[in-house]
Image (cartoon, rainbow, N blue to C red):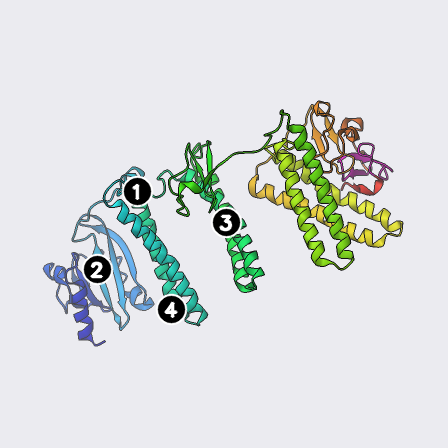
Amino acid sequence: MSNEEIIRAFHLMWDNFPEAVTITQKSREIVAVNKKAAEFGLTPGIKCSSIGKPENHKGCQCDKAVDTGEAQFCTYEGNFGKAYGYWIPIPEKPEWVIHFGVGYAFEYPKIDRSPSAKAKESLHGLTKGTNLEAAMGALATGEASGVMMYYALARLAKEQGLNEVAATFIESANQEAVHAGFYATLNGRVPKDFWQFVAGVAKAEYCGKTKIKGLADMVRAAGLTAAADEMEIFAEQEWHHGVVIDELIAKHAPKDSIKDGKKWVCGVCGYEHVGDEPPEVCPVCGQPSTVFKEKVSLHGATKGTDFEFISKEAARAELNGTMMYYALACMAKEQGLDDLAKTLADLGTQEAVHAGFYATVSGKYPKDFWELLDRVKAAEFGGEANVKALAVKFREAGFGKVADEMETFAKQERHHGEVIEELFKQYKPDFKPADTAGKKVYVCPCCGYKYVGDLDAEPDDWTCPVCAQPKKDFKLMDAAPALKAEPGQKTFVCTICGYEHVGDAPPEVCPVCGQPASVFKEKV
């Protein structure tokens, strides 16, 4: 651009600006002025440094703007309080800058940015109940649809190598998303006090992982591997959304903002609504109230009724069915009948689901399950040593292949413990086990599960929740108290029950859980 074209463009852009604006050279000579600058007596040809007192120019950033090619600014006291000075380089003319101040010649309205002021400025629900409500709803839906369209177009453009086009479509989609959120806010589509709502959204996100994963399996079975791969990524992202929301709730939600009450679950997306009735429309997926079902806990439903015994027996029967089907699957696999083995294993998994259901309705396990899970974790870690010890015996007896598989199982037992440990880190980072001081502690001789309390108060048919050993086999840990090691003495710990033995070598048999010396490890 020529000098004349730059000056002409300057006047078109800046002549009606309410503050004084100039084009100034690095030498401080003024090249052009807008109308407001002319009112103050500024004219092309004079040096801006000659205007006013020298101290008024101490914060000048003209040189820096020219040398770096980047816009600069500073603050100073103007006629109406704090003002801001700007120097913006002109790319076509490196020695020239556009210079102006904000707050020098014009008093701007003061904006109250206090929390109370922000609350007053809320746009939430402004059109709800007015003749504009339907229009805003249609706009929100239309803009949301536009988001989907632009992202679809971006994907197609990217597949064709048109990355710049794809980036433009994505930018448009993000703007459409902002528009949709704006119109939905005007309509009061989501509640202003949103924490309860957001907690329900988290449930929908978690549910989304399961639903999308299931669909991905169907898509993969249809031969669409690439699509299935991407859907599995989406499934993990849905779960991650739920985790992020829960973390936000834990960090920011006001106390008592998440209320308990009757829960309704959307049968389409999994959104969970709390209230006496389901919402007229699901705020997440837009489905009507008819798709909602009341969420009712089945835990202990048959406990104390005539059906408790039936539920317990059904659980045992289904558990045996699980074992049977997986044994049949093992034999089918040995005979090269892989399809049959898979079908039998699927049946076994279904029987396991049934067993879990009947155990739930009979109240076999506590509803607040974290204390139980903490003890199961210890049992899983202990199970590694126990299974390894058994594998050694099988190998010594000449059953090498059996021992090989059992050693794999031993690693899986430890992995179960590690998985549970990660669950605690994610969901219960501040969990502390119940204090066992002054309480009886019984240990399962098979898996090492610890029962805290009065085991005699449990019914006669009570069994270990991990390995189903009868309660009569449990050992009272107080029967073999740990000894304190003297300096120079070794301490060996039973990996099954935690019993500590002091001596030069572990005992031949653990006096608490009856496990052999091979399950002991030296305590360092």
Under mark 4, the amino acid is Val
Q: Which residue is mark 2?
A: 100
Q: Secondary structure at mark 4?
A: helix
The residue beneath circle 3 is 208
Q: Residue at x 83, y 35 (%)?
A: 514
Residue at point 67% right, 31% down? 310
Mark 2 packing: few (<14 Cα in 10 Å), some, or many (20+)?
many
Q: Nearer the viewer, residue 280 or 66?
A: 280
Tell me which amino acid carries mark 2.
Phe
Which quarter of the figure is the N terminus placed in?
bottom left
Q: Nearer the viewer, residue 170 or 492?
A: 170
Q: Mark 4 packing: few (<14 Cα in 10 Å), some, or many (20+)?
A: some
Magenta-colored span: 489-515
Instruction: Give me the C-alpha separation between circle 2 and circle 4.
Output: 36 Å
Label 2 vs label 3: CA separation? 53 Å
Residue identifier under label 4: 165
Location of mark 1 (residue): 124
